[in-house]
Amino acid sequence: MAAYPDDPLIVAPDATVSDVLQLMRAQQTGCVLVCSAGKMLGIFTDRDALRWMAKQTDNGSNGSAKQPISELMTREPTSLLASTSVGEAIQLMSAGRYRHLPIIGTNGMPSGMANVHGIVHYLVDHFPQTIYNLPPQPDMAQAEREGA
Amino acid sequence: MIPCPSCGFENLEGNDFCDQCQNSLTDLSIPQQRSAVERGLVKDTIEFLKPHKPSSVSPNDTVGEVLQKMVSEKIGCVMVVEGEEIRGIFTEFDALMKVNTNAASLADKPISTVMTASPVTIEIDHKIAFALHRMHVGGYRHVPVLNKGKLVGVTSIRDILNYLAERIVVSA
């Protein structure tokens, strides 16, 4: 997996939701992995965070800030191995509509996090001139030809 | 006719810039674009990606209403629209950065207090390369699509990923 994986952000299963949300804000990341005893248990993404926040704004609130993250995480997420090809990662990502895929190292612990921006970055690297050398404004060309 | 060295489009004599990809026709040092994907990126317009119909809210809607709308409609971003003009955008990432653990206390505040104001937009007849450039450089997931200044859709990084994945055979 050469597609610019991020370092994984790891939390313990008994961390509270509010701690995790504040950590995600401080690190400006959309995804944390929940690990315990050398094993990945689950993933908690900004989508899960949104669900929790929506529940908080509901008057019949049934989620508290002290809830452990293990109750809200997605268990056993789809993951990649370090040897997985970028092509397979893209396939998994489009088929499962995922934006983040953890990469599991040889010791069973996550070693990285593949995300959709990294993959796009990787693809853009195939044709940098086309993307980076664009004209400054998209509408400089005339819509119609002038004259005759 | 002057074939554009960059995209191959046949331009009228006397053009300084290519009518299709807008690269200079006089500058002979411009890089050559070879692959079909690259030609597609400067030829296909945003319309080709079939932008999704945007979910819009008014600036006075409360944060609570908007969060619940995003969850129930299973969408990652809403457009904050006043009249026909786009005022801002509110995404999952904005929710995480600005609402965070204060969800309960912000629930009755208008969405305009936490939205990202005047987001980067793109016109529907612009080329896909520009959308990709904006998302890649700005790190955005969603770019609102306008048609002559009027909001008509939203294109996401997933659409672009699917577009590229269909066309590029990635080697391991």
Image (cartoon, coloured by chain):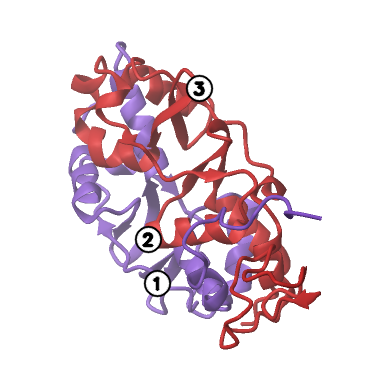
Chain colours: A purple, B red
- Marks 3, 1: nearer the viewer: 3
Q: Tell me the tag on residue A108.
A: 1
Place residue B153 in its image quadrant.
Answer: top right
Q: The N terminus of chain B appears in which quarter of the rendering?
A: bottom right
Label 1: element kind: loop
Please name the amino acid that badge 1 sits on: Gly
Name the residue rendered at 65%, 77% in the picture: B170
Asked whether the residues under marks 3 and 1 belong to the same chain, the reply is no
Q: Tell me the tag on residue B84.
A: 3
Give the crowd class for mark 1: few <14, some 14-19, many >=20 residues within 10 Å. few
The reply to whether residue A69 is in sight is yes
A74 sits left or right of B129 in the view: left
Label 3: element kind: loop
Measure how far apart labels 3 and 1 are at the Cα level. Answer: 52 Å
A68 sits left or right of B46 in the view: left
Please name the amino acid that badge 3 sits on: Glu
Where residue A126 sits: x, y (%)?
Answer: 57, 78
Name the residue rendered at 26%, 42% in the picture: B97
Return the residue at label 2: A40
Q: Tell me the tag on residue B169.
A: none
Chain under label 3? B
A61 sits left or right of A47 in the view: left
List the single residue furthest toward the top.
Answer: A59
Residues B11 and B84: in front is B11
Count numbered badges in the picture. 3
Name the residue rendered at 49%, 57% in the picture: A137
Give the crowd class for mark 2: few <14, some 14-19, many >=20 residues within 10 Å. many
Q: The C terminus of chain B appears in which quarter of the rendering?
A: bottom right
Residues A114 and B146: in front is B146
